[in-house]
Amino acid sequence: MAETPRAPAHIRTLPSWLLGRAAARGHRLVGEALARVGLRMMHHAVLSAVAESGPLSQAELGRGLGIDRKDMVAILDDLQGEGLVTRAPDVTDRRKNAVAVTASGRRLLRRAVRLGDAANDELTAALSPAERAQLVDLLTRIVQPGEPCAAPPHGGR
């Protein structure tokens, strides 16, 4: 049987192709790590956003994370079913549900953050700490053109 052909040399030099390959590897590593605590990546993102920003409406969460409204409802149903978040009418606008993290959700999130950090360390193992910080800066500039880069969390590890 013939070997699987490699992508053409020109394709292998395109930033878009390389970013896609790196993203696929990162998603696999982080997805596998989070699965060890029963989380999927989008569930982790929602749990992290609520923990960082305090109670938020479902709509705010969806806009902030780029998650479709129907998908957000399903994610929150899962998280609430596991006892990781609560939903209650917003005190300032009872038409909205405010989503908050439970104590159990915070405990799980601490474990998930450690696992996600370890997966990202594996993803960037070939880089020095300075190169990793530079990579984060460059990717942030690509993802958010014209916006100032935020300091990397966790000391830029």
Image (cartoon, rainbow, N blue to C red):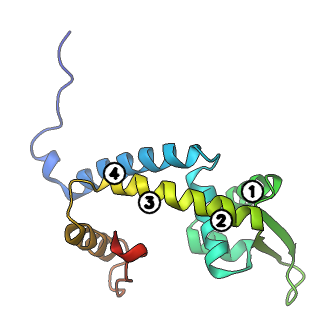
The answer for how far apart the CA atoms under marks 1 and 2 are is 8 Å
Residue 88 point in image, percent of width and height: 88, 73
Number of numbered labels in the structure image: 4
Residue under pointer 2: 47
Residue for badge 4: 122
Q: Residue at x 16, y 46 (%)?
A: 11
User: Between marks 3 and 1, how big is the CA–CA gap?
Assistant: 21 Å
Quadrant in which the N terminus appears:
top left
Extreme top residue here?
A: 1
Give the quadrant of residue 144. bottom left
Which label was assigned to residue 27?
none
Q: Where in the figure is residue 123, as x and y percent of width and height? A: 32, 52
Q: Is residue 66 left or right of residue 72?
A: left
**Disc 2 packing (10 Å; few <14; some 14–19; many ≥20):** many
| First along the sequence among labels 3 and 1 | 1
Dot 2 and dot 4 residues touching (CB under 8 Å): no
Q: Which residue is mark 1?
A: 79
> For numbered disc 4, what is the local secondary structure?
helix
Disc nearest the viewer among 3 and 1: 3
Residue shown at the point (21%, 72%) measured from the top left: 130
Badge 3 element:
helix
**Label 3 environment density (alpha carbons within 10 Å; few <14, some 14–19, many ≥20):** some
- Nearest to N terminus: mark 1 or mark 4: 1
Q: Are marks 1 and 2 in contact (CB under 8 Å)?
A: yes
Q: Viewer-nearest of labels 2 and 3?
A: 3
Identify whether 3 is placed above or below 117. above
Residue shown at 82%/53% (left/top)?
A: 81
Q: Secondary structure at mark 1?
A: helix
